[in-house]
């Protein structure tokens, strides 16, 4: 007899990670709330941190290997290829970098991301998230990673750069950084205010500094260093980082800090 045709699943979520003992558990608890573990995937880039490896095994851990820790062109290629692979089995695929949380607006979608994904129209090829940079203010305490993050942070910046096209039912020809793609119309086309991207790079100053210090010690590709790609991840001088943290642009966007919408506190991240 012929091969049995298996039904496609609704949605898969994946990320790529290297030694992220703080952000991977946050990513995991957010996405496991909305998708079965069997539909969540972590591309694990040679992690040596035991917490990262252990958490990744709670869903599908896919080992990948590369001598450079940072290589934007390689990263884009790997992510594009894995998205294409998942689209063989899923109607929709959502990719997020490890310091990003994609969540549904709690007023528009009380049922969260699961409700949002269930309602994506069949004819919609891709969706741009509505991007927000979450930024610790000087008078706010060091973050408690075990508590809901947005209950501890009141400010941020609406951010075009993080209004990324990350959810799709077709292969995306992303550019480095995943802010745009060859086959996706330019911002603001396709943006959906109900689908939020919360960028957590600046959610805690102390952790941002520690993470930058670790990143600066890793091996970067010569091409990335030549063009300054990811330079914000290599700022290790405290005062220089403080200046960037509160005034530095977000990938070409001016950083205008304002209160986060109050109902964002309902998002349990």
Image (spheres, helix red, strand yellow):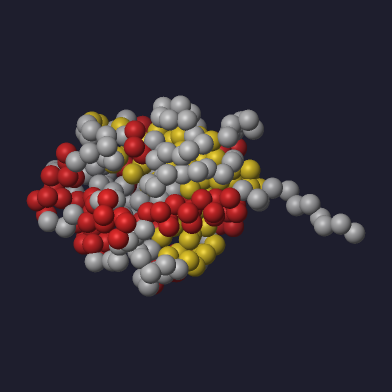
State the residue in front, 175 or 146.
175
* Residue at image coords 30%, 66%: 219
Q: Is residue 113 above or below residue 31?
A: above
Is any part of residue 112 visible from this angle?
A: no
* Residue at image coords 23%, 62%: 216
Q: Is residue 182 above or below residue 37?
A: above
| Left/right of residue 215 with respect to residue 5 in the rendered view | left
Q: Quadrant of the N terminus?
A: bottom right
* Residue at image coords 52%, 64%: 62
Is any part of residue 200 visible from this angle?
A: yes
Residue 65, by quadrant, is bottom left
- The location of residue 202, given as percent across then percent down, is 25, 47
- The location of residue 129, given as percent across then percent down, is 43, 35
Residue at the left extreme of this rendering:
239
| Left/right of residue 158 with respect to residue 66 in the rendered view | left
State the residue in front, 116 or 80.
80
- The location of residue 102, given as percent across then percent down, is 43, 43
Q: Is residue 232 above or below residue 22?
A: above
Residue 22, by quadrant, is bottom left
- The location of residue 198, given as percent across then percent down, is 36, 41
* Residue at image coords 48%, 48%: 95
State the residue in front, 110 or 232.
232
């Amino acid at each position: 007899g012929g091969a049995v045709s298996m039904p496609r699943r609704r949605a898969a979520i994946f990320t790529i990670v290297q030694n992220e003992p703080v952000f991977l558990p946050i990513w995991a608890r957010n996405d496991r709330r909305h998708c079965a573990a069997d539909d969540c995937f972590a591309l694990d880039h040679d992690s040596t941190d035991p917490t990262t490896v252990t958490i990744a095994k709670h869903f599908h851990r896919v080992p990948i290997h590369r001598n450079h820790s940072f290589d934007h062109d390689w990263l884009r290629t790997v992510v594009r290829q894995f998205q294409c692979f998942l689209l063989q089995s899923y109607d929709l695929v959502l990719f997020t970098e490890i310091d990003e949380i994609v969540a549904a607006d709690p007023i528009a979608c009380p049922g969260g991301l699961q409700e949002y994904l269930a309602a994506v129209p069949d004819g919609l090829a891709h969706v741009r998230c509505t991007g927000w940079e979450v930024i610790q203010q000087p008078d706010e305490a060091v973050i408690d990673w075990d508590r809901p993050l947005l209950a501890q942070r009141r400010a941020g910046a609406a951010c075009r750069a993080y209004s990324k096209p990350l959810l799709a039912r077709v292969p995306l020809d992303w550019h480095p950084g995943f802010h745009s793609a060859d086959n996706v119309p330019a911002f603001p086309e396709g943006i959906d205010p109900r689908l939020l991207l919360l960028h957590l790079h600046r959610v805690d100053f102390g952790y941002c500094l520690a993470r930058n210090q670790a990143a600066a010690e890793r091996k970067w590709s010569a091409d990335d260093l030549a063009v300054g790609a990811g330079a914000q991840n290599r700022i290790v001088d405290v005062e220089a980082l403080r200046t960037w943290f509160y005034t530095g642009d977000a990938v070409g966007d001016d950083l205008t800090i304002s209160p986060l919408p109050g109902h964002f506190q309902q998002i349990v991240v």
